[in-house]
Image (spheres, helix red, strand yellow):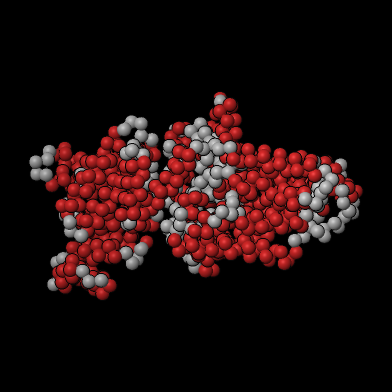
Amino acid sequence: MNGGERAVERDLGREPGHAIGRRIGPGWALLLFLAALLPRVGVALQYGAAHPFAEDPTIDEASYDAWGARIAEGEWLGDEVFFQEPLYPYTLGVVYAVFGHDRRAARLLQCGLGALTAVLVAVLGARTFGRAAGILAGAIAALYRPGWLFPSLLLKPSLFLPILAMIALVLLASRQGRARTAFALGVLAGLGALLRGNVLLLLPCFVLWPLARAMAVRAPIRGALLRAALVLAGALLVLLPVAARNHYVGGIFALTTSGAGTNVYGGNNAANPHGIATELDWVRGIPEHEAGDWRREAERRLGRALDPGEVSSYWLSQVLDSIQREPLLHLSILARKLRLTLGAYEVPDNHHLEWDARYLPLLRLPVGGFGVWGMLGLAGALLFALLRGRGAGVDRAAALELLALAALYVATIVLTVTSMRIRLALVPLLLPFAGFWLHTGWRLRRSPRGRARLASALAGSLALAALIVHTPVFGPEARAGDLDERDFNLAAAYLGRGDIAGARRLARALDERYGGRSSRVLTLLSGCDFEEARALAARGQETDAAALADGAWARIAPLLELEELPVRERFRANVMAARIAIARRHWQAAAVTLRRALTFDPEDPALRIGLARTDFALARRALRDDDAAEDERAAARERVGAALAELEAVTAADDCPPERAVEARLLAAEFQLDPLLGNWTAAQNHLRAALRIDERNRAARGLLATALWRSGTGASAPERAEAEAILMQLLAEEESAELRELYEAVRK
């Protein structure tokens, strides 16, 4: 043992090798694992059976689920700079590759990771405060109520929590000065940065940690420099391949993602005074659109095209400029985020604990969340400070380092965005202190000497922690609004699934609550009317369908003229209005609303396809009007060409989803098949292009048969033969009077 290590041991007030009593033992480890596993599995099973989003994930879950599925299908590299941290979706991709696209398998594996986290918390607590305190900390982790929910969600915390707990354990173990431990700390920190971007802010701290530790105990710096270099090497070993991949696909240097600047701006701007996860006026809260929405707004402000790195730098510069202009405002935002981070309220983002508990009976058990166990963790940290690190079983230096890590993690939250999901990773770092507080309280009855002082310290620490945790930041109305947000999301999901009655029930309740003044609820109700009108039309009830569509238009049309309507809500209203107008064949209104919507997102392929359809319909009306002037006809012909060019541009876009490319090709073929154009060869080319994307597409095959028959009438036997073969195959799959009629015509 060198002099530095002996100095560390003297600082701890113990002899080398004092590990007995700081291990929980395999029996306790197994018991804690099972105690944590069983409720998590129970919640996961209830989630799969009863939760409305179990098989229809939304927002970030939908993004990770789809990303993992693409990776499982072989799309390992991707073609864009990462906007979200990649380690979780790649882990999900491995799970899907092994088990198939089975969300239940992913959830059950995450339950195991949650149970492992409880054991790691117990080990961390035992390492810091002794065996009894560690077991208590592990038991709390097993019972922590939010921890029961997250394994059921396809989100990063299930993987991040055990990695952060291991970072804390390895950080404390690295005090022994072993090179391999320092390297392992760097590797774990790199993995953590690929799960949560705020860990990148901690990387310099981990690199400097050995130096700070050596300076604190006056140990030689040379060994500390080596360990610092090993921490850095371990982190770079993990991160540099990701940076190389980002440079290869995007041409920029991004160590993990290109979303750092947007994340900082999202939690540090005047429009978000509490620094919580929220939708800004120009950003849709849907991962597939977020990167594009941030980029377009930055480009609009700067008036030039930007790459992902420049977008991130722009939004970061906006925060720095704002801090210079209004430092007091930003101090107040940071203070509110700190209060929320250390407060009892579980700030929702994608999920709301109390809302989810409506569907998950196990979550209604009174086992406690941050309001109980987080409070005890803070009380334990305060007690440690009041006792100046003294106490039976306390490893003072380890406790100080664990407390420093917790404080640094809180700082990274306060600098970005706070929520229940982000705050969850703080809990494994605090629970050892909760175990320490409980164990100290238990020992009070056996400590005749100094009992009054110890009791005062216990009571004072708990009272101060309770004041910090239970002083509310949000009032009842704001909390009710958080629940309404989840009801709105569920109503939108119901509507997307075709459950019009379920969507309408929730939307009407929200409309009543907000007194008919919520623009997005009115848009949602219009969507309910529109989808019901479509369903009635499909059943042949044209009159009722037309009446409902007219009602939907009457409900949404006034919103389009409201000047105070937020940009994002105006976009949603225009999109819905355009869909209604197209269904009513009010082509001019459809064109106006689509063009308005495209000012928000000019790259949206669905909107561009809709505008092409609308322009062609308007052009066809003019070309068929015998009384139309020649200049009107010329303008109509130009509009047809523009519509076809727009569809071609949609299919040529690198990021065009395959289903949209097929839709654009089908629509272009329909245009060419129209008697006004009658370009059968062009129609065939579009349809064959669509079938190269989706060879089983029934509509494309049917239209191809039509194009072949029309081009082949009177001459081409091969084209007639191909049309007949396609129609025979389609009729074998599903009988249709229309296809049967075409088949008979082809045969003749």
Image position of 537 (left or right of 466): left
Along the horizontal axis of the image, is 261 left or right of 551?
Answer: right
In the image, residue 184 sits, relative to residue 347, either above or below, namely below
Q: Position of residue 702 (x, y in %)?
A: 25, 65
**Which of the 4 image quarters holds residue 459?**
top right
Q: How many marks can you see?
A: 0
Residue 743 drawn at (x, y percent): 18, 70
- Tell which of 349 and 719 is nearer to you: 349
Identify the residue at image location x=29%, y=60%.
Answer: 687
Q: Position of residue 53 (x, y in %)?
A: 44, 57
Residue at figure coordinates x 18%, y 48% from the top left: 547
Q: Quadrant of residue 282?
A: top left
Residue 259 visible in the picture: no
Q: Position of residue 695 (x, y in %)?
A: 34, 66
Q: Nearer the viewer, residue 302 or 326?
A: 326
Residue in front for this viewpoint, 215 or 562: 562
Q: Residue furthest left?
A: 627
Residue at figure coordinates x 9%, y 41% from the top left: 627
Asked if residue 664 is positioned above or below residue 629 in the image, the reply reads below
Q: Quadrant of the C terminus?
A: bottom left
Q: Is residue 6 visible?
A: yes
Indicate whether 575 appears above or below 671. above
Is 324 rendered above or below residue 516? above
Quarter holding the N terminus?
bottom right
Q: Residue at x 13, y 39 (%)?
A: 630
Whether residue 269 sits left or right of residue 669 in the image: it is right
